[in-house]
Amino acid sequence: MSKSEQITRTVGKPPILAVALLAVVFAFGLFIVGFDQGHIFSVIQGVDAYEELYIHELTHDMRHAAGFPCH
């Protein structure tokens, strides 16, 4: 007797909610790396955040690598 094995392959679609959530996370990350000039921390620090630019300095090299001009 010979044994035969059957392989079943199912093709499914990715969950729409997961794709939408990843798109939101990507858009927020793009804003932080590319466009934030103190806006995020201004909620906590007030006007001082526009002078300190913590996130800008943290992501400075990433901005250049992604092609965003910042100075």
Image: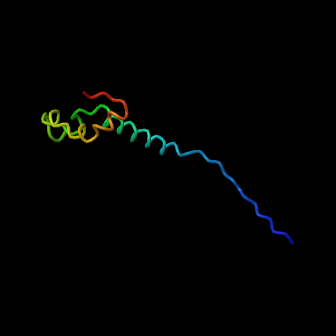
Relative to 44, is 4 above or below?
A: below
- The answer to whether residue 24 is left or right of residue 51 is right
Find residue 34 and report its horizontal and vertical position in percent.
32, 33
- The answer to whether residue 50 is left or right of residue 15 is left
Residue at 59% across / 45% down in the picture?
13
- The answer to whether residue 70 is left or right of residue 15 is left
Relative to 6, is 63 above or below?
A: above
Please tell me which residue lies in front, 65 or 50.
65
**Quarter of the figure with the N terminus:** bottom right
Residue at 62% across / 47% down in the picture?
12
Q: In which quarter of the image is residue 68?
A: top left
Find residue 18 and report its horizontal and vertical position in percent.
48, 45
Residue farthest to the right? 1
**Quarter of the figure with the C terminus:** top left
Residue at 39% across / 41% down in the picture?
25
Find residue 48 and report its horizontal and vertical position in percent.
12, 36
Find residue 28 and report its horizontal and vertical position in percent.
35, 38
